[in-house]
Amino acid sequence: MLPGLEAAEMPVDAIEVGRIADAWGVKGWFKALPHSADPEALFSSKRWYVLPAEKGPKTFSGAGCLVISDIKHHADTVVASAQGIDDRNGAEALRGARIFVARSNFPMPGDDEYYWVDLIGLAVVNREGIVLGVVRELLATGLQTVLVLSFQHEGKSMERMIPFVSVYIDQVDLIARRIEVDWQPDY
Protein backbone atom coordinates (compact mmCIF):
# COMPACT_ATOMS: atom_id res chain seq x y z
CA MET A 1 0.00 0.00 0.00
CA LEU A 2 0.96 3.60 -0.53
CA PRO A 3 1.90 5.84 2.40
CA GLY A 4 -1.31 7.34 3.81
CA LEU A 5 -3.46 4.64 2.25
CA GLU A 6 -4.61 2.00 4.75
CA ALA A 7 -5.61 -1.44 3.48
CA ALA A 8 -9.34 -1.75 4.06
CA GLU A 9 -12.43 -3.70 3.13
CA MET A 10 -15.10 -1.80 1.26
CA PRO A 11 -18.24 -1.15 3.34
CA VAL A 12 -21.21 -3.22 2.21
CA ASP A 13 -23.09 0.01 1.43
CA ALA A 14 -20.21 1.67 -0.49
CA ILE A 15 -21.30 4.00 -3.31
CA GLU A 16 -18.91 5.38 -5.91
CA VAL A 17 -19.05 9.18 -5.63
CA GLY A 18 -16.06 10.40 -7.65
CA ARG A 19 -12.46 9.89 -8.65
CA ILE A 20 -9.11 11.46 -7.90
CA ALA A 21 -7.98 13.52 -10.88
CA ASP A 22 -4.48 14.61 -9.95
CA ALA A 23 -2.21 16.15 -7.34
CA TRP A 24 -2.92 19.75 -6.32
CA GLY A 25 0.07 21.73 -5.14
CA VAL A 26 3.18 20.32 -3.49
CA LYS A 27 1.96 19.48 0.03
CA GLY A 28 0.04 16.27 -0.68
CA TRP A 29 -3.33 17.74 -1.65
CA PHE A 30 -5.25 16.16 -4.51
CA LYS A 31 -8.19 17.07 -6.78
CA ALA A 32 -11.34 14.99 -6.53
CA LEU A 33 -13.88 15.05 -9.34
CA PRO A 34 -17.30 14.28 -7.85
CA HIS A 35 -19.84 12.36 -9.93
CA SER A 36 -22.56 14.67 -8.61
CA ALA A 37 -23.08 18.39 -9.08
CA ASP A 38 -23.62 18.52 -5.30
CA PRO A 39 -20.62 16.74 -3.73
CA GLU A 40 -22.01 16.62 -0.19
CA ALA A 41 -21.26 12.89 0.10
CA LEU A 42 -17.55 13.71 -0.19
CA PHE A 43 -17.83 16.42 2.47
CA SER A 44 -19.92 14.29 4.82
CA SER A 45 -17.38 11.49 5.23
CA LYS A 46 -13.90 11.63 6.74
CA ARG A 47 -13.09 8.16 5.40
CA TRP A 48 -12.89 7.71 1.64
CA TYR A 49 -12.52 4.18 0.34
CA VAL A 50 -10.59 3.94 -2.92
CA LEU A 51 -9.99 1.40 -5.64
CA PRO A 52 -7.30 1.74 -8.29
CA ALA A 53 -8.08 3.41 -11.60
CA GLU A 54 -9.92 1.16 -14.05
CA LYS A 55 -7.60 2.23 -16.88
CA GLY A 56 -3.98 3.26 -16.99
CA PRO A 57 -1.11 2.44 -14.65
CA LYS A 58 -1.90 1.01 -11.22
CA THR A 59 0.12 2.45 -8.34
CA PHE A 60 -1.70 0.36 -5.72
CA SER A 61 -3.92 -2.71 -5.67
CA GLY A 62 -6.97 -3.70 -3.69
CA ALA A 63 -9.19 -1.47 -1.61
CA GLY A 64 -7.73 1.22 0.58
CA CYS A 65 -8.96 3.90 2.92
CA LEU A 66 -7.94 7.55 3.05
CA VAL A 67 -8.52 9.43 6.31
CA ILE A 68 -9.43 12.91 5.06
CA SER A 69 -7.91 15.70 7.12
CA ASP A 70 -9.15 18.70 5.09
CA ILE A 71 -11.49 19.27 2.16
CA LYS A 72 -12.74 22.33 0.30
CA HIS A 73 -14.34 23.51 -2.94
CA HIS A 74 -11.95 24.78 -5.60
CA ALA A 75 -13.38 26.01 -8.92
CA ASP A 76 -15.41 23.12 -10.40
CA THR A 77 -13.65 20.45 -8.34
CA VAL A 78 -13.02 19.50 -4.75
CA VAL A 79 -9.54 19.46 -3.24
CA ALA A 80 -8.61 17.39 -0.22
CA SER A 81 -5.72 16.23 1.89
CA ALA A 82 -5.39 12.95 3.74
CA GLN A 83 -3.37 11.82 6.74
CA GLY A 84 -0.01 10.39 5.73
CA ILE A 85 0.08 11.94 2.26
CA ASP A 86 2.53 14.79 2.70
CA ASP A 87 3.93 15.55 -0.74
CA ARG A 88 3.06 15.79 -4.40
CA ASN A 89 4.45 12.31 -5.17
CA GLY A 90 2.06 10.71 -2.67
CA ALA A 91 -0.89 12.61 -4.14
CA GLU A 92 0.11 11.75 -7.72
CA ALA A 93 0.15 8.04 -6.83
CA LEU A 94 -3.61 8.31 -6.22
CA ARG A 95 -4.33 9.63 -9.74
CA GLY A 96 -7.37 7.93 -11.25
CA ALA A 97 -8.44 6.20 -8.03
CA ARG A 98 -12.18 5.69 -7.72
CA ILE A 99 -13.66 7.18 -4.52
CA PHE A 100 -16.36 5.39 -2.54
CA VAL A 101 -18.24 6.54 0.56
CA ALA A 102 -20.45 4.43 2.80
CA ARG A 103 -24.09 5.23 1.97
CA SER A 104 -24.77 5.45 5.72
CA ASN A 105 -22.46 8.52 5.80
CA PHE A 106 -24.45 10.49 3.23
CA PRO A 107 -26.21 13.53 4.67
CA MET A 108 -29.97 13.19 5.04
CA PRO A 109 -31.76 14.56 1.98
CA GLY A 110 -34.41 17.23 2.46
CA ASP A 111 -38.12 16.78 1.87
CA ASP A 112 -38.82 15.70 -1.72
CA GLU A 113 -35.07 15.26 -2.35
CA TYR A 114 -33.58 11.91 -3.30
CA TYR A 115 -30.20 10.48 -4.04
CA TRP A 116 -30.06 9.03 -7.53
CA VAL A 117 -28.58 5.82 -6.18
CA ASP A 118 -31.76 5.33 -4.11
CA LEU A 119 -34.02 5.68 -7.18
CA ILE A 120 -32.23 3.15 -9.39
CA GLY A 121 -34.13 -0.14 -9.40
CA LEU A 122 -37.47 1.32 -8.30
CA ALA A 123 -40.60 0.24 -10.18
CA VAL A 124 -42.45 3.06 -11.92
CA VAL A 125 -46.25 2.77 -11.98
CA ASN A 126 -48.80 5.20 -13.39
CA ARG A 127 -52.04 6.33 -11.72
CA GLU A 128 -53.95 3.49 -13.40
CA GLY A 129 -51.59 0.92 -11.86
CA ILE A 130 -49.79 0.09 -15.12
CA VAL A 131 -46.13 -0.77 -14.56
CA LEU A 132 -44.12 1.43 -16.92
CA GLY A 133 -40.73 -0.03 -16.12
CA VAL A 134 -37.85 -0.01 -13.66
CA VAL A 135 -35.48 2.93 -13.20
CA ARG A 136 -32.21 1.94 -14.90
CA GLU A 137 -30.45 5.31 -14.65
CA LEU A 138 -31.02 9.04 -14.38
CA LEU A 139 -29.87 11.71 -16.80
CA ALA A 140 -29.11 15.31 -15.93
CA THR A 141 -30.23 17.34 -18.94
CA GLY A 142 -29.41 20.75 -17.50
CA LEU A 143 -32.97 21.91 -16.96
CA GLN A 144 -34.23 18.77 -15.29
CA THR A 145 -33.40 15.21 -14.37
CA VAL A 146 -34.90 12.42 -16.46
CA LEU A 147 -35.73 8.90 -15.29
CA VAL A 148 -34.59 6.27 -17.80
CA LEU A 149 -36.76 3.17 -17.45
CA SER A 150 -36.21 -0.34 -18.79
CA PHE A 151 -39.20 -2.49 -19.71
CA GLN A 152 -40.15 -5.42 -21.92
CA HIS A 153 -42.54 -5.09 -24.87
CA GLU A 154 -43.36 -8.12 -27.01
CA GLY A 155 -40.20 -9.84 -25.81
CA LYS A 156 -37.93 -6.90 -26.61
CA SER A 157 -36.01 -4.76 -24.14
CA MET A 158 -37.21 -1.18 -24.45
CA GLU A 159 -36.45 2.18 -22.86
CA ARG A 160 -38.81 4.92 -21.69
CA MET A 161 -37.90 8.38 -20.36
CA ILE A 162 -39.93 10.41 -17.89
CA PRO A 163 -38.94 13.87 -16.62
CA PHE A 164 -38.34 13.73 -12.85
CA VAL A 165 -40.36 16.87 -12.12
CA SER A 166 -43.32 17.37 -9.79
CA VAL A 167 -45.84 17.79 -12.62
CA TYR A 168 -45.31 14.09 -13.55
CA ILE A 169 -44.10 12.54 -10.29
CA ASP A 170 -46.93 11.92 -7.83
CA GLN A 171 -45.07 9.99 -5.15
CA VAL A 172 -41.71 8.37 -4.43
CA ASP A 173 -41.92 5.54 -1.91
CA LEU A 174 -38.42 4.32 -1.15
CA ILE A 175 -39.66 1.73 1.35
CA ALA A 176 -42.09 0.16 -1.16
CA ARG A 177 -39.43 0.67 -3.91
CA ARG A 178 -41.95 2.39 -6.17
CA ILE A 179 -42.53 5.69 -7.95
CA GLU A 180 -46.07 6.70 -8.92
CA VAL A 181 -46.34 8.95 -11.98
CA ASP A 182 -48.86 10.77 -14.13
CA TRP A 183 -47.67 9.23 -17.39
CA GLN A 184 -49.19 6.97 -20.01
CA PRO A 185 -47.46 4.00 -21.68
CA ASP A 186 -47.95 5.51 -25.15
CA TYR A 187 -46.25 8.87 -24.40
Image (cartoon, rainbow, N blue to C red):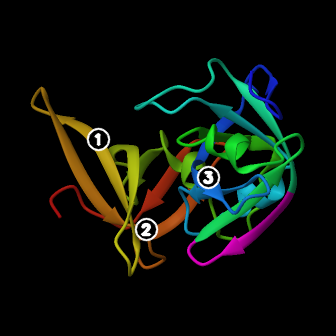
3D distance between C-alphas at marks 3 and 1: 19 Å
- Is residue 136 covered in magenta? no
Task: Give whichever of 173, 128 is nearer the camera.
Answer: 173
Where disc 3 sits, the SS reads: strand
Sequence-first disc among 1 and 2: 1
Left-right relation of 144 to 183: right
At 40% across and 76% down in the image, what residue appears?
144
Left-right relation of 180 to 186: right
Task: Give whichever of 122, 9 is nearer the camera.
Answer: 9
Pinpoint residue 45: horizontal percent, then vertical percent.
83, 50
Q: Is residue 63 above or below residue 40?
A: above
At 63% across and 23% down in the image, what residue appears?
60
- Classify residue 16 by image quadrant: top right
- Is residue 75 covered in magenta? yes
State the predominant SS element of the stretch in magenta: strand
What are the residue bounds of the magenta stretch? 70-76
Q: Which residue is mark 1?
A: 150
Q: Is residue 45 above or below residue 78?
A: above
3D distance between C-alphas at marks 1 and 2: 15 Å
Q: Quadrant of the C terminus?
A: bottom left
Sequence-first disc among 3 and 1: 1
Pinpoint residue 133: horizontal percent, then vertical percent.
33, 43
Q: Which residue is mark 3?
A: 173
Q: Which three-letter amino acid code belongs to the residue tagged 2?
A: Phe
Q: Is residue 49 above or below residue 160?
A: above
Left-right relation of 146 to 33: left
- Classify residue 81 by image quadrant: bottom right
3D distance between C-alphas at marks 2 and 3: 14 Å
Q: Which residue is mark 2?
A: 164
